[in-house]
Image: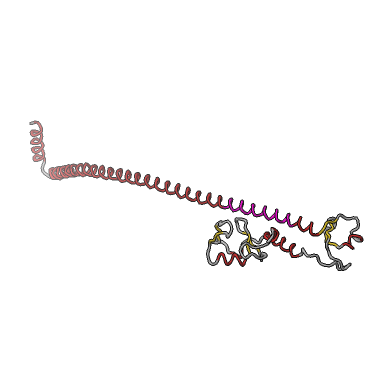
Amino acid sequence: MDSEENATSCPVCREIYSDPRCLACGHSFCLKCLKVVAGNKQKFPCPICRFDVDLRNTNVDQLSKNFVLCNVIEANEKKQPSMCSAHNKSLDLFCQLCEVVICSKCLTMQHKGHDVVDIETMYSERNKQYGMLLESTQRLALMIEEKRDAVKQSRISMEKNIDSISKTVENTFKKWNDALLKQCKAIVSYLHQERDKKRQVFSKAERILAGSMTTVTGLNTEICELRTKGISFVIQVFLQLSTISLH
């Protein structure tokens, strides 16, 4: 098998690619071969480089089609020259001005004076260009996969950092809240103690005032009774009170 056949043959089945699909690592395989390799697994290694292929968010059918390979295979299938419908001669030349395949008779008539090359030469040149383009797309796919992994790791790191900061903030505010609650309880307890002390002071004052009020009320009653007595009796009682006051 020559290099040209290698470029258009699936590494798994060793046949011409059938619906080639491209993995993130840049390697391509037939869709049917990938289905066999993947089976029912969500992850499987690339048959060539062993790169982990992740199918958790997709499936084999959704893998990108390798259109460059498709074009190469299509061009390869057209490699054998067909016959010119106008002159019944092999289409073995390529007109670079008109970019069409022509026969030797076409060259002497419609394409006289145009720059032409052998169709084999043109095919080899185009196939080489397709191969270079394929290598570029594979490198690009690998670079994109690396970038995607870097973004994924950055996202995971970001989420871990946010979770860590959130827990730190929650724990800090919990400590502050516990300290404030403890201080609040201490202040409330002190106020209740002060209230109890003040209640005792006010209760004592109320008892003293109540006793005084009883005494005053009794005096008022006696004074009222004295006012109902005769003049001589009132004077006699007043003199007695004055004598008591003087002694």
Residue 147 percent location from the top left of the image:
59, 50
Q: Nearer the viewer, residue 195 or 187?
A: 187
Query: For the magenta stretch, what is the residue range?
Result: 127-148
Name the image quarter holding residue 74. bottom right
| Residue beneath the point at 31% across and 46% down | 185
Counting the numbered discs, the total is 0
| Residue beneath the point at 8% across and 40% down | 233
Q: Nearer the viewer, residue 151 or 24?
A: 24
For the N terminus, the image quarter is bottom right
Q: Is residue 67 part of the magenta span, yes or no?
A: no
126 left or right of 66? right
168 left or right of 40? left
Colouring style = secondary structure
| Residue beneath the point at 91% across and 60% down | 108
Q: Is residue 142 part of the magenta span, yes or no?
A: yes
Above or below, 131 against 242 in this view is below
* Extreme-front residue of the structure: 1
* Extreme-top residue of the structure: 246
For the C terminus, the image quarter is top left
Q: Nearer the viewer, residue 66 or 194?
A: 66
Task: Please name the predominant secondary structure of the magenta segment in the image.
Answer: helix
Residue 192 percent location from the top left of the image:
27, 45
Residue 64 percent location from the top left of the image:
64, 60
Residue 103 percent location from the top left of the image:
86, 63
Q: Nearer the viewer, residue 133 or 148?
A: 133
Name the image quarter holding residue 187. top left
122 left or right of 53? right
